[in-house]
Image: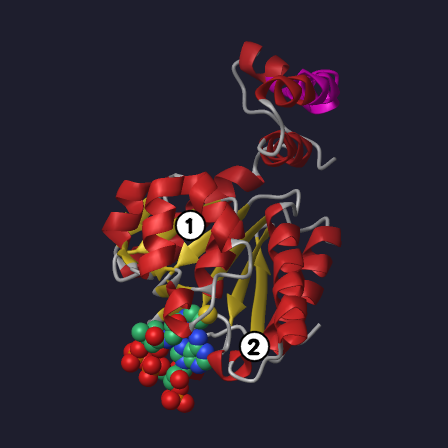
Amino acid sequence: MAYHNLLIETADSIATLTVNRPDKLNALNGETIEELHACVNALRGDAAVRVVVITGAGQKAFVAGADIEELSQLTAVMAETLATRGQELMWKIENLGKPVIAAVNGYALGGGCELALACNFRYASSNAQLGLPETGLGLIPGYGGTQRLPRLIGRGRACEMILTGTTLTAEQALAAGLVNRVLEPPQLLPAVLEVAGALASRSTGTLRLALKAINEGANMTLDAACRLESALFGVCGGSDDAREGCAAFLEKRKPKFGNS
Ligand code: COA
């Protein structure tokens, strides 16, 4: 399927999804949000795709936020609908069931930071800047940022970032735990593709169950989450991939996982 504001390229079981509105620093207008919904739905159903990488077109921005031109025209009802639609997208990305990695190659502001937060983990280029500057526009984050940021970096740091609208440099984001690695711009995508390749060689079923335990468990009490973990451990513990992975270790060879 061809998209107006997205590029999608698949190689070696890794789909690279690029938000492609470089003249607007890849800002997420309504059309782009709808295209992302369609694209993420397609990626979910595509068994040939085992890992997804999300990045932005050009050298300057991952995604510089929701489209402020559109935000300037909203009524209260439209604003709530927009936030709900964006949140549904972020949930879908976070719960894709296959690893989704953000390659944050520049500004990741507002909805762009929220898109990065919805990915399972983030690598950033040294020129990246991440933040939720919405309060400066008389708004609050609406695509899950008030919830995912505090859960990731702690409530105090998140309050400071959201209330002041301060953006973090890549190094500050690394120190805060907002990104996992910082790389020079030319090395960003190769490093992300390297880790994506390592994930693509693992059992898709195992990774899906690990993500389910992490994501669903995050919204439960520790006790309930550990019971979920043991139930999911039961599912994977009896699987062909567990037989294969353990046998390969004992036989000192590389495992050959199925694509279940
Ligand atoms: N929505 C709509 N358009 C945006 C945008 C956004 N979130 N972010 C950038 N753009 C547009 C600019 O309006 C400009 O368009 P134009 O050339 O037609 O005037 C173009 O992208 C380039 O941006 P510009 O501001 O000229 O680049 P810069 O290097 O001077 O500044 C930023 C970069 C990221 C600091 C600045 O663009 C910015 O602050 N953007 C908004 C960030 C934000 O508040 N996001 C949260 C929204 S909820």
Which residue is under mark 1? 192
Circle 2 crowding by C-alpha within 10 Å: few under 14, some 14–19, many from 20: some
**Quarter holding the N terminus?**
bottom right
176 on left or right of 235: left
Q: Is the C terminus in the top left, top right, bottom left or bottom right quadrant?
A: top right
Front in this rendered view, residue 238 or 177: 177
- Circles 2 and 1: CB atoms closer than 8 Å: no
Residue 29 numbered mark, or none = 2
Query: Which quadrant of the view contains residue 254?
Result: top right
Residue 77 location, quadrant: bottom right
In the image, residue 218 sits, relative to residue 185, either above or below, namely above
What type is the residue that disc 1 sits on?
Val
Q: Which color scheme did the rendering employ for the protein?
A: secondary structure
Would residue 152 be seen by someone viewing this image from the given angle? yes
Find out if the beta carbon at label 2 lies less than 8 Å from the nearest ligand 1 atom: yes
Q: Is residue 246 left or right of residue 64?
A: right
Kindly state the secondary structure of the residue where label 1 is placed.
Answer: helix
Residue 186 image-quadrant placement? bottom left
User: Of tags 2 and 1, which is closer to the observer?
Assistant: 2
Which residue type carries mark 2? Asn
